Image (cartoon, coloured by chain):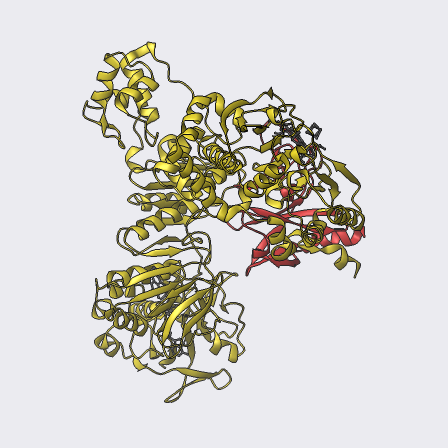
Amino acid sequence: MTKKLVVIGAGMASGRVLEHLFDAGADYDVTLFNAEPRGNYNRIMLSPVLSGEKTYDDIVTHDVNWYESHGVTCRFGEHITAMDREAKTVTGQNGTVSYDKLLIATGSAPFIIPVQGKDLPGVITYRDLDDTNAMIDAAAKGGKAVVIGGGLLGLEAAAGLKERGMDVTVLHLMGHLMERQLDEAAGYLLRRDLEDRGIKVKCRASTAAILGETHVEGVMLEDNEGLEADLVVMAVGIRPETRLANDAHLDVARGIEVNAQMQTSDPDVYAVGECVEFDGQLFGLVAPLYDQAKVVAKSLVDEADVFLPKELSTKLKVTGCDLFSAGDFADGEGREDIVFRDPARGVYRRLVVEDDAVVGAVMYGDTADSNWFFGLIKDKTDISEMRDTLIFGPAYQGGTPMDPLAAVAALPRDAEICGCNGICKGQIEDAIADGATDLGAVRAVTKASGSCGTCTGLVEQVLAVTLGDDFVIPAAQSICGCTDMTHEDVRRMIKSRELKSMPAVWQECGWKTSCGCHVCRPALNFYLLADWPLEYADDPQSRFINERKHANIQKDGTFSVVPRMWGGITTPDELRAIADAAEKFAVPTVKVTGGQRIDLLGVKGEDLPAIWKDLNDAGMVSGYAYSKGLRTVKTCVGTDHCRFGTQDSTGLGVKLEKTLHGSWTPHKLKLAVSGCPRNCAEATCKDIGVICVDSGYQVSIGGAAGMDVKETELLIQVPTEEETIDVIKAVTQLYRENAKYLDRIYKWMAKVGLDWIEEQIVDLETRQALVDRFELSQSIYRKDPWAEHATKKAETYQPLADLKLEAAE
Amino acid sequence: MSDWIDIAALDAVPQRGARMVKTADGCVAVFRTAEDEVFALDNACPHKQGPLAEGIVHGKAVTCPLHNWVISLETGLVQGNDEGQVATYPARVEGGRILLDGSFMNRLRGAA
Ligand code: SRM
Ligand SMILES: Cc1cc2nc3c(=O)[nH]c(=O)nc-3n(C[C@H](O)[C@H](O)[C@H](O)COP(=O)(O)OP(=O)(O)OC[C@H]3O[C@@H](n4cnc5c(N)ncnc54)[C@H](O)[C@@H]3O)c2cc1C
Ligand code: SF4
Ligand code: FES
């Protein structure tokens, strides 16, 4: 007797099940319900419909004729509201139907973030044809669209809306786009491509509310930034549609639980597609659903088969954004990264290799070989033989690897070597023939490698090929093992290419690791914040613990706390507050430092926010005793008390410390102001020292009294206090913009020369520009980090959990 | 037997960062990588007991804040020319929560 199969949901998964079932000649009388008022269509092609490349008719997979010829009773536009497993019936809006076997294929529902305004007209999700048509209608009116969610769906929506002429902004909660499929480097390239086509992207953007009276008017972010919007698309994720199964008491975890035959906890009820959970896994792409569909069809005709989840890959259907990701691409012990970057073409490829097999791949820009790589992952192919050339793809396998010098030698004379300056190989050869026999000389004559520096290696290879044994390619000191570039090269790139994030630097400078290391990250963090104070957000995770926690770590893991004592001046109230804090937090050692202030040593990490709060309440702020930044400005008593004082050295010291505090510098920055040449503040062994004289102020720089003892050299003498402060701001900024990370002023000065520094400072226009840039940066960084940490981040200083307590319970 | 205990939300630990969990047996550092994987290791460097939770996390390794030894989060082995190993404990993420293996808790209960 023909059995009755009822199918709930006419989506991508159930369409496949029915095809397989009829192909196998199964004897079922099928009733197909769908909440949408239409039959099966290719949901993933909604994006081309949105962008206008396709119409709905193009993406229908099963039409009226097909259903008729297979005797399928279609009940489209009818929502199943209940199922009765005892009676074996399901009930829709138009009545009840009984089944012998039931298939639940209800897919997922878009997740809606529970913010105020989420129900306003003009706020839509992206799941079905109605949503797509709503977006197309909205776009016809033009205006501004905000897409919440920078994952696959959100970006396809954004690209489609942009294509239809809207002004589109994507808001994404995480630090980079599509973070579940892409690493930061690929995320950066994707963002760049989207921005190039006019889509605005905001990462780390958390939506606080959707605004509007009768229709959406805007979006408010957690940081109180407001964005205008005529349309808001919410694409933040999906949830398996399990309501029916829940009500019918089937086993449901996050999805409807099924075994490898796609059977639910009721043997007559099967489930397939995005609504299921198998072995703890959910499924959001069609490839595994198609595998499931085969298994369901087999199970329904009592043939044995099992569903086995396979490796998945992702692509984005946005023209011009070629990306691919597959497998597991996290770093790890025993895992090696093979990274290839072609900054000029915007290409990034990363393979993760473990035990001589590729386990993961991320690609951006050129994904032509992605299928080949995906095959290597799926088949766990042994790649030991082709390792050296693997990253270049299948075309390079089997041949002998090319000697790089031979490749350069083979280049024609008109091959471009330096892209920035348009210098060809022939011009470099001519320069060499005319006597430019090292890199510096070639750079001086031709400008090749003088801008972004990425072609430095190529220029050196041309030198080697042309001069033969007379030229040995010098091994420049690179920042660390993650890159071949020097600090200077990278810094030049950051400025000339306007690189404003770490992934941008990693990509454009060809980093060999996926996310840097403890040596390069702090340096990059400094360069980026110094060069792009407004655009770049400081990354605490790339800072040494002292700067991350704003206290100095001790050998036993406790910390020292040093409040600022502006210019060495304090008051009875401050001293009392310090004494109280020392007592309250049982500080083992209180010491007067060599920098004219008081150090509280041995404070427990957990107590830091509380002790800072007490010191803040008494008007004190962080002394940055831990920083590559402004430390102290030592002063002597000056005209206030001293019989030899010529100017108010204490007052100037206080002013300098107040204006410079909070600024980050390549290494620590120490200042001192002495009231006369007797120099009681030891100003001539500081990074910047001021000696007051009758006629004004002598500013000298480049002193030190640590591992090297250096006397400062006179930079300039100026008549007024005001000008002294400007000169010091300017020289500090010049140092910030040009010095290598971890070079103190004296080391930097030895490289660039005091004369060059002097020229910049003496020229009033240059000086003013430096002062302006310094002030711009200080508008962000002149603040007390303790206050922020004590109020907003105090919780992060506590242990994550205290299992001691639990164990005792 | 796996008996996982819920420790905290994944977001309570910053990416490329760590937080510490106190146990009767000493402190355990819970690390989160850039790729959102979590690892649990004793919070003491084999060199001179440096607090690893305060180190810089890169790839699946952490650099000790005291003298820059680099330690694998997966195996606890010291990398490069230095030698030593830190104890590691099973840890995983599920539904946005960090879970530690309960058998490790039992060891602690036994000890307590
Ligand atoms: C607390 C203090 C010693 C004291 O008790 O007086 C001190 C303590 C440390 N100094 Fe210092 N220095 C202190 C004044 C000095 C001075 C004197 C001065 O500033 O007038 C010098 C010589 C002047 C100079 O810097 O040229 C000094 C030259 C150094 C050096 C060598 C720097 C160099 O370029 O050669 C280091 C190592 C480094 O920074 O790499 C250093 C590093 C350190 C560190 C931060 C070591 C570390 O990384 O853990 C010490 C932290 C101890 C702690 O846990 O708090 N400390 N240190 C002084 C804090 C001053 C302040 O109030 O901020
Ligand atoms: C815009 C877009 C782009 C995508 N791009 C890709 C891609 O490039 N690659 C990829 O692999 N995947 C992509 N996907 C995901 C893919 O479409 C889904 O994984 C797939 O459609 C899921 O199939 P399904 O049959 O489980 O559910 P669905 O296709 O969602 O079908 C479920 C159907 O059940 C109906 N239903 C639900 N509850 C009831 C009820 N109680 N009664 C009656 N009917 C009900 C729903 O109305 C729906 O029509 C994309 C998805 C979208 C929305
Ligand atoms: S002199 Fe050496 S031991 Fe003394 S505080 Fe400075 S760094 Fe530490
Ligand atoms: S204690 Fe960790 S490196 Fe010394």
Q: Could you say where residue A137 lies in the image, as x and y percent from the top left? A: 26, 73
User: Where is A499 relative to A298, above or below?
Assistant: above
Q: Is residue A662 visible to us here?
A: no
Q: Could you say where residue B60 lies in the image, as x and y percent from the top left? A: 54, 42
A238 left or right of A455 in image: right
**For residue A508, what is the image quadrant?**
top left
User: Where is A75 relative to A178, above or below?
Assistant: below
As drawn, the residue found furthest toward the top would be A470
Q: Could you say where residue A430 lies in the image, as x and y percent from the top left? A: 21, 16
A661 left or right of B105 in image: left
Q: Colour of chain A?
A: yellow
**Between A588 and A313, the one nearer to me in the picture:** A588
As drawn, the residue found furthest toward the bottom would be A95
Q: Quadrant of the N terminus of chain A?
A: bottom left
Count of numbered labels shown in the rendering: 0
A128 left or right of A655 in image: left
**Between A258 and A173, the one nearer to me in the picture:** A173
Identify the residue at image location x=77%, y=51%: B24
**Between A321 and A748, the one nearer to me in the picture:** A748
Q: Quadrant of the C terminus of chain A?
A: bottom right
Identify the residue at image location x=35%, y=46%: A189
User: Where is A750 relative to A80, above or below?
Assistant: above
A480 left or right of A793 in image: left
**For residue A18, what is the image quadrant?**
bottom left
**For residue A448, what is the image quadrant?**
top left
Q: Is residue A68 visible to us here?
A: yes
Q: Could you say where residue A418 lies in the image, as x and y percent from the top left? A: 27, 29
User: Where is A372 relative to A28, above or below?
Assistant: above
Chain red in the figure, letter: B
